[in-house]
Amino acid sequence: MTKELEGKTALVTGASRGLGVHMALRLARGGALVAVNYASDEAAANETVRLIEKEGGKAFAVQARLGSEVAARELADKLDVELTARTGGNRLDILVNNIGGGDYGGIRDTDEAMYDQMFDNNVKGPFFLTRALYERLNDFGRVINISSTGARLTDPSIIVYTMAKTAVEAFTRVLALELGKRGITVNSVAPGFTAGPTNDYIVNDPVSAKQVTDITALNRFGQPEEIADVVYFLASSAGRWVTAQHIEASGGFRL
Ligand SMILES: NC(=O)c1ccc[n+]([C@@H]2O[C@H](COP(=O)([O-])OP(=O)(O)OC[C@H]3O[C@@H](n4cnc5c(N)ncnc54)[C@H](OP(=O)(O)O)[C@@H]3O)[C@@H](O)[C@H]2O)c1
């Protein structure tokens, strides 16, 4: 049976660890050839590729520490080479701007370096990567930006994260109008607290874990596969009429 994303190409940024691994796995399971981006941990990126290949999928690792225009252009150049070798062209169907996060803090704890890092990871990275890949994106393709429930919260302890992820959502909405002319959908997916390396220290501490689950409607942590499923929905034909949307996958965190 032909898989839904057979013949499609995808790039998932930050797919050597955390949620990105599962997004890459899910898209590959759907038949896409997946570029697994990482910043420095080549072995971990190769492990993502190995997991995909073990399931019969197709993937390759591609290094770039995103957050600047130069890095975005370098990644686009590397993709040209890798995609052309595998598909005969440099076209991309699905771009998942997943990198993000940074050092959290309130206004009094946040110095300029922390502020810049937060905006570089969450805003500048996705913006300039999308710009670098603009012409390479196929008509009827997908751009999926990973935001956070943090974009909706009013929590002074994550002020810059909220500012940055709110910018991601503005980026999503405006880009959707522009790329809509080419049939490309642009959406953001906002995870809540999800099990994985970023949150192990909370998940594994019963007191902290309970604080999170007590204010989550579904009363548990999300699983990375549950975020990947939403990304897959948007990438698949089932998501073809959804654009400019912000979809929270948080189990109902802090309603
Ligand atoms: N985890 C959650 O519960 C949660 C909740 C809400 C929102 N989110 C959002 O979901 C996204 C993924 O979160 P996560 O927790 O899975 O993140 P993570 O574990 O910190 O992601 C790490 C991955 O990103 C790569 N990476 C980091 N900085 C990079 C850069 N500048 N350029 C390229 N790759 C880079 C790492 O590569 P190396 O291995 O090479 O370092 C690794 O593959 C983020 O946008 C985050 O804000 C996550």
Image: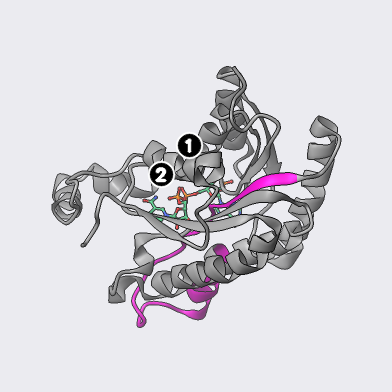
Q: Which residue is mark 1?
A: 22
Secondary structure type for disc 2? helix
- Towards the viewer: 63 or 164: 164
Q: Which residue is mark 2?
A: 227
Q: Residues in magenta?
A: 92-121
x and y, in percent, of residue 8 in the image: 68, 36
Q: Is residue 226 visible?
A: yes
Cα gap from disc 1 to disc 2, whole angstroms: 8 Å
Q: Residue at x 21, y 62 (%)?
A: 255
Side (left or right) of 16 relative to 18: right
Amino acid type indicated by mark 2: Ile
x and y, in percent, of residue 80 in the image: 82, 45
Residue 2 found in image quarter: top right
First along the sequence among labels 1 and 2: 1
x and y, in percent, of residue 130 in the image: 67, 60
Q: Residue at x 26, y 49 (%)?
A: 251
x and y, in percent, of residue 165 in the image: 45, 67
Mark 2: is the Cβ under 8 angstroms from ligand 1? yes
